[in-house]
Every structure is written in structure tokens, then in C-alpha cells.
């Protein structure tokens, strides 16, 4: 029995290493001996293999009209001077063309409207799958200009009163009004509940709570007559974000909103 098992191991055992992981292990051992021993190489091989599976999925699982796309991870934290080479990426599957698109065109639906819907769909699908697209990426995918993507996105947001999860908004990049201000605007100017705001901005109750607290900090500093630079220093916010919060305060004042009462009620609602 033992001889039979030994023969089977000798005959078939090597076959389990005749794959990508085995070839990669040999490559590391021969070309990168400084990496360490077998255990270290096994960890690296597994990590690389996982990346290959993530970024090169089997195309048999993709439906007609779908595309695999590599983008920035949804949970990545942006910071000044951070390059894309230092940014965590992820792979997402997007519906570039839907089965019903041809039928809607046949019924006379405008190409412009289809593209606007596609812009919103790509941003939302990427976010749902753990990624965060930029305007430039959607422009490349749909073969339209960056300003056109931005225009369609703004129109969609206004029509549906829903914030699209664009990277410029969600990660506070570029000139786009930040999602923090958008959230506070919905709560204070539009009178939305925390639950509605969470749905329309793809944020958790904890995140909404943080932004209410940040808005209160700016309000307190403003009442103490600090200037923009002093408020930015005290709250550790950017000048642009402080200016947007101050503009929101002016809008509230124009509409005679009771800021203190709103802050108190919303703080209570978040805790519930």
C-alpha cells in the first residue's frame, strides 16, 4: 500500500505545481533569491496570484456589453501630492452597453439621454463594486469629452436629487463641491432626513454624523469672528472646504433658517 502511495506521489505529485503559481515560485527562487526562503516566496506567490484573479477575471463570466475596468479603490484616502502609483486600485465590472439600449433607440430615445443615463450608471456601478471612477475614465469609456461627462453628471444629480459617487466628489479632489458640503446642504437647506441623505449620497450614518460635527466646528469658529485661514487651521480643513461651509451658512441666513435648532435636531436623529 505504501509503495503504491509513494509511486502515486512520485508520478502525480509534480503535476500540482505545473501552473502559474508554480512557475512564479520558480521565477522568484531563480531570479530574486534575495526575497527569502520558501515560506516568504509562498506568501508573495499567493498575493500575486490573488491580484491576477482580481484584475484578469475569466471573460466567460462577462455578459455581452460588459467590461472589466481597473480604477481607484472606493475606500482609498486621497491626500495632497499622492500619485496614482501610490494609490490602491481595484477591478470592477461595468455595463457599458445594456440589452435594452438598442430597443430604446429604436423607439426614438435620444442618444444624449442614453449617454446621460450611462454616465450615472457607470459611476454607481463602480462604487457598488468597490471602485470610484473619475470623469476622465467615464469619458474614455463612453468616447465623449470630460466636460460633457461633468455636464451630464450635474444634470442627473439635479434631476434625481442624488449625488453621483464621482472621485472628485467622494475623495475631495479638484474643483467639485465636496460631498461633505453636499450632505450638509441636503440636511439643512433641503430638509432631508439622515436616512434619505445616506441613500442619496452613498454614505453611512457615522459619516453623516462626522460632517454635521465639522459643520458645527465651522459655525462656532465663524461666530467667534475667525477668518477663513484661522478656521482652516483650527479645524484642520482646507480653505476651499471652509469657504464652502461659510457659503452654506450665508444661504441658511438668507432663508432665515434656525441653525441651532437644526443642528440639535439632526444630532439627535443621527444618534437614533
Image (tube, grey):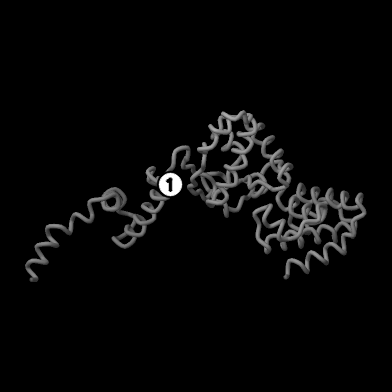
Q: How many numbered marks have been drawn onto this rendered protein structure?
A: 1
Query: Image check: 268 left or right of 38?
Result: right
- Residue 219, image x and y in percent? 84, 58
Residue 170 image offset from top left, x and y in percent: 65, 49
The residue indicated by pointer 1 is 55
Hey, which quadrant is residue 109 in on the image?
Answer: top right
Foreground residue among 106 and 54: 106
Quarter in which the N terminus is drawn:
bottom left
What residue do we see at 68% from left, 42% from top? Answer: 174
User: Is 55 rendered above or below residue 112?
Assistant: below
Q: Residue at x 79, y 48 (%)?
A: 244
- Decide if residue 166 is on the left or right side of residue 230: left
On the image, the x and y values in percent for residue 135 come to 62, 38
Q: Position of residue 121 (x, y in %)?
A: 59, 43
Nearer the observer, 3 or 235: 3
Name the residue: 8% across, 66% down.
4
In the image: residue 230, left or right of residue 56: right
* Callout 1 secondary element: helix
**What residue is at 67 percent from the left and 55 percent from the top?**
199
Amino acid at each position: 500500500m505504501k509503495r503504491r502511495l509513494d509511486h502515486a506521489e512520485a508520478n502525480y505529485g509534480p503535476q500540482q505545481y505545473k501552473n502559474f503559481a508554480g512557475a512564479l515560485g520558480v521565477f522568484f527562487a531563480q531570479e530574486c533569491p534575495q526575497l527569502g526562503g520558501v515560506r516568504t516566496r509562498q506568501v508573495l506567490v499567493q498575493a500575486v496570484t490573488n491580484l491576477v484573479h482580481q484584475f484578469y477575471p475569466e471573460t466567460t463570466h462577462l455578459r455581452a456589453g460588459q467590461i472589466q475596468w481597473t480604477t481607484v479603490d472606493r475606500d482609498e484616502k486621497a491626500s495632497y501630492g499622492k500619485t496614482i502609483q501610490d494609490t490602491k486600485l481595484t477591478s470592477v465590472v461595468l455595463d457599458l452597453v445594456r440589452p435594452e439600449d438598442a430597443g430604446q433607440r429604436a423607439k426614438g430615445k435620444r442618444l444624449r439621454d442614453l449617454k446621460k443615463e450611462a454616465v450615472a450608471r457607470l459611476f454607481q456601478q463602480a462604487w457598488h463594486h468597490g471602485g470610484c471612477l473619475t470623469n476622465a475614465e467615464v469619458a474614455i469609456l463612453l468616447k465623449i469629452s470630460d466636460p460633457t461627462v461633468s455636464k451630464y453628471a450635474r444634470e442627473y444629480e439635479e434631476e434625481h436629487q442624488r449625488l453621483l459617487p464621482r472621485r472628485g466628489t467622494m475623495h475631495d479632489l479638484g474643483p467639485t463641491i465636496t460631498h461633505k458640503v453636499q450632505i450638509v446642504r441636503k440636511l439643512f437647506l433641503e430638509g432631508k432626513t439622515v436616512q434619505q441623505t445616506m441613500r442619496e449620497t452613498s454614505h453611512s450614518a457615522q459619516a453623516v454624523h462626522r460632517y454635521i460635527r465639522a459643520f458645527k466646528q465651522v459655525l462656532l469658529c465663524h461666530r467667534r469672528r475667525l477668518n477663513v485661514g484661522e478656521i482652516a487651521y483650527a479645524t484642520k480643513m482646507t480653505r476651499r472646504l471652509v469657504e464652502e461651509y461659510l457659503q452654506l451658512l450665508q444661504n441658511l441666513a438668507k432663508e432665515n433658517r434656525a441653525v441651532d435648532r437644526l443642528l440639535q435636531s439632526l444630532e439627535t436623529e443621527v444618534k437614533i
